[in-house]
Image (spheres, rainbow, N blue to C red):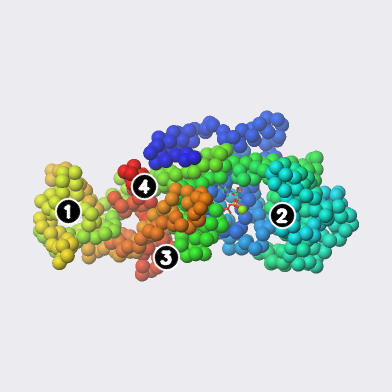
């Protein structure tokens, strides 16, 4: 289901923004659950939340929803929120990812209460596993993974009990301890919870709690060669941290029964018993939000890195020039759903544009240059006043150099054009932004017939801001421009959607990689006004009439690199409405 598309975007966002600025905005269904708990006597001071990423990749825009949700609840209820790394799979996890995740959560503007790691609880989890064995609730199964799978049954047929299910407590304890001591190869034994092989919930059919894995862990190194499974770890970690509401995505709904079963084995009466509740995953159109799939884009060289500005990762969006405010507003605007849905990426772009419109200084840059010679302009230069942000008086003015030879965009000139073409045509006039009115007199072509230069005259009395009658004269078009001899060359990276399909990973017969947009990146040379010589990495500007751009970290002392963050309007909406 597509919740909002660009057609109804404006109204949708207006309505939502209105309701957000009102502190009495309607509660989402998770807040309703919390309110109900408070009403039933749960003390507000015992509320506690967590954001629990697995450090197996970089965070993406989907995670941003979960971050905004959990930390948002922390702010609303003045409750602590932990950042917990769910690091139980040494195969995929790395310190690099831990560092990136911390950076991203901080950048989004949130502060966690304490930094936790599931791996810090390995000993406690092991001790609890011993308790389960002693209570006859867990056993060591010595079958192969294939044998166990063959006994699982189907949703309509009960499974078959393992021949090792009724091992004695003593034998189980010994085997489990030997597993921990490293006496067995991988796959030789596993510890399983003894629940119910005929449960209608397949997850309750004696799930595996531990497997042998002879792998070094990024934090515990080789201390352990048995690793706890997600289901066994997650709820118990919530319990150790006394998390009151453990919010996860819908695919865990079926796991809730197991979450509760595992808690029942350890919970003490005077402690908070965590409650798992599920909400819908956030899917964004024209991209994929799964660390595993994003990892493929990096590994197969489709993008340069996890923080490639085309990636929907937080670090990619940051490098692209998206602000934390825009991402938070996006998460808030969409809210929390109960059913999986696909959100059009133009909604995120709307928020980005909205924010940049307020803060980004206006500058001039020509991306596809055509030389214009102003034949009656004297040699030399003059420095004109240019307003930094018409929406913000405090932003002030800067100086831009004007001279006889300037660049304009190729698309802004035609030899002949109809009345609707408000740009420059032979015999026609336009105003140059912050400068003069010019008139196109003639043009020069190369041997292939391409226009390579336009000759114009200017009206010396028409200078913007001079107050003269001519300066107030209205002409239909205003163009941006850059003085040729003062222009600063920069590498400009123009990004487009990473996938051509709205939902690339929902096709049954086709791999999502088949929908990669072959022209998601175009690198060109831009000619920029000289004030940009001093631009610093991360600076954000509006190239007037062209879009919002930011300075990429690839910038060096001798080379400026700009990323196009977003265009001035939604170009995809135009394309799709034409079809
Ligand atoms: P991925 O498949 O991308 O690795 P994941 O769910 O396995 O996603 P985790 O690191 O386990 O990633 O997720 C941390 C938290 O973020 C979990 O609570 C998870 O439910 C939530 N989360 C992950 N993806 C999304 C999403 N697309 N929308 C909302 N929440 C998400
Ligand atoms: Mg995961």
Q: Report the Cα–Cα distance between label 3 and label 1.
A: 36 Å
Check disc 3 and report its element: helix, strand or loop.
loop
Residue 190 position (above or below residue 240): below
What's the CA distance linking mark 3 and mark 4? 28 Å
Q: Which image quarter: residue 457?
A: bottom left
Badge 4 density bin: few <14, some 14–19, many ≥20, Cα 10 Å: few
Number of marks present in the image shown: 4
Earlier along the polypeptide chain: callout 3 or callout 1? 1
- Real-space Cα distance between discs 4 and 2? 47 Å
Viewer-side label of 1, 2? 2
Indicate which disc, 1 or 2, sits on the residue closer to the N terminus.
2
Q: Is residue 49 left or right of residue 189?
A: left
Residue carrying label 3: 554
Asked which secondary structure carries label 2, the reply is helix
**For disc 1, does the CB lie below 8 Å from ligand 1?**
no
**Sequence-first disc among 4 and 2:** 2
Query: Which circle marks residue 572 in the picture?
Result: 4
Q: CA distance from mark 1 to mark 2?
A: 70 Å
Residue at image point 62% right, 41% down: 278
The residue that mark 2 highlights is 149
Horizontal side of 192 relative to 382 (left or right) equals: right
Q: From this viewpoint, which residue is outermost toward the front?
A: 157
- First in sequence, mark 3 or 2: give its number: 2
Check whether the beta carbons of the residues at disc 4 and disc 1 lie within 8 A of each other. no
Residue 358, numbered circle:
none
Label pair 3/1, CB-CB below 8 angstroms: no
- Residue at the image position 43 percent from the left and 63 percent from the top: 553
Mark 2: few, some, or many residues within 10 Å (few <14, many ≥20)? few
Q: Which quarter of the rendered picture does the C terminus lie within?
A: top left
**Residue 381 x, y percent position in the rendering:** 18, 61
Residue hosting label 1: 414
């Amino acid at each position: 289901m597509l919740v909002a598309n660009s057609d109804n975007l404006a109204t949708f966002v207006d309505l939502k923004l209105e309701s957000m600025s009102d502190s009495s905005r309607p509660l989402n269904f998770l807040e309703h659950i919390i309110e109900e708990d408070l009403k039933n006597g749960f003390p507000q001071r015992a509320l506690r939340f967590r954001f629990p990423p697995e450090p197996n990749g970089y965070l993406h825009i989907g995670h941003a929803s979960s971050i905004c949700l959990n930390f948002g609840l922390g702010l609303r209820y003045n409750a602590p929120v932990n950042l917990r790394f769910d690091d139980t799979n040494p195969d995929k996890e790395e310190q690099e990812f831990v560092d990136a995740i911390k950076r991203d959560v901080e950048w989004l503007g949130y502060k966690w209460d304490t930094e936790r790691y599931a791996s810090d609880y390995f000993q406690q989890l092991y001790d609890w596993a011993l308790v389960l064995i002693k209570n006859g609730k867990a056993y060591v199964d010595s079958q192969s993974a294939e044998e166990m799978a063959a006994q699982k049954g189907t949703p309509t047929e009960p499974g078959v009990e393992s021949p090792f299910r009724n091992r004695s407590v003593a034998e189980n304890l010994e085997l489990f301890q030997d597993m921990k001591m490293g006496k067995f190869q991988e796959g030789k034994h596993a510890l399983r919870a003894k629940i119910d092989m005929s449960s209608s919930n397949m997850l309750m059919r004696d799930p595996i709690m531990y497997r042998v894995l002879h792998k070094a862990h990024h934090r515990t190194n080789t201390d352990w060669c048995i690793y706890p499974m997600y289901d066994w770890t997650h709820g118990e970690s919530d319990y150790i941290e006394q998390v009151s509401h453990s919010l996860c995505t819908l695919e865990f709904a079926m796991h809730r029964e197991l979450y509760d079963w595992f808690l029942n084995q350890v919970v003490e009466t005077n402690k908070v018993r965590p409650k798992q509740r599920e909400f819908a995953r956030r899917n964004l159109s024209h991209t994929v939000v799964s660390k595993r799939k994003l990892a493929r884009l990096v590994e197969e060289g489709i993008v340069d890195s996890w923080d490639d500005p085309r990636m929907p990762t937080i670090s990619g969006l940051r490098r692209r020039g998206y602000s934390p405010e825009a991402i938070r507003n996006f998460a808030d605007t969409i809210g929390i759903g109960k059913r999986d849905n696909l959100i059009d990426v133009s909604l995120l772009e709307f928020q980005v544009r909205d924010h940049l419109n307020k803060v980004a200084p206006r500058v001039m840059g020509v991306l596809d240059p055509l030389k214009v010679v102003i034949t009656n302009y004297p040699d030399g230069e003059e420095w004109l006043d240019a307003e930094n942000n018409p929406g913000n008086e405090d932003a002030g003015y800067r100086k831009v150099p004007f001279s006889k030879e300037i660049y304009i965009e190729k698309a802004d000139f035609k030899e002949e054009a109809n009345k609707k073409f408000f740009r420059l045509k032979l015999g026609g006039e336009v105003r140059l932004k912050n400068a003069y009115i010019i008139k196109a007199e003639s043009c020069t072509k190369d041997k292939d017939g391409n226009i390579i230069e336009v000759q114009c005259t200017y009206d010396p009395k028409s200078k913007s801001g001079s107050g003269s009658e001519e300066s107030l004269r209205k002409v239909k078009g205003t163009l941006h421009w850059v003085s040729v001899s003062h222009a600063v060359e920069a590498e400009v990276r123009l990004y487009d959607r990473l996938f051509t399909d709205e939902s690339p990973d929902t096709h049954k017969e086709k791999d999502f990689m088949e929908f990669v947009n072959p022209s998601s990146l175009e690198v060109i040379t831009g000619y920029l006004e000289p004030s940009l010589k001093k631009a610093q990495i991360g600076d954000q500007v509006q190239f007037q009439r062209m879009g919002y751009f930011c300075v990429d970290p690839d910038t060096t002392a001798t080379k400026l690199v700009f990323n196009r963050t977003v265009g001035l309007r939604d170009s995809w909406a135009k394309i799709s409405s034409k079809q």
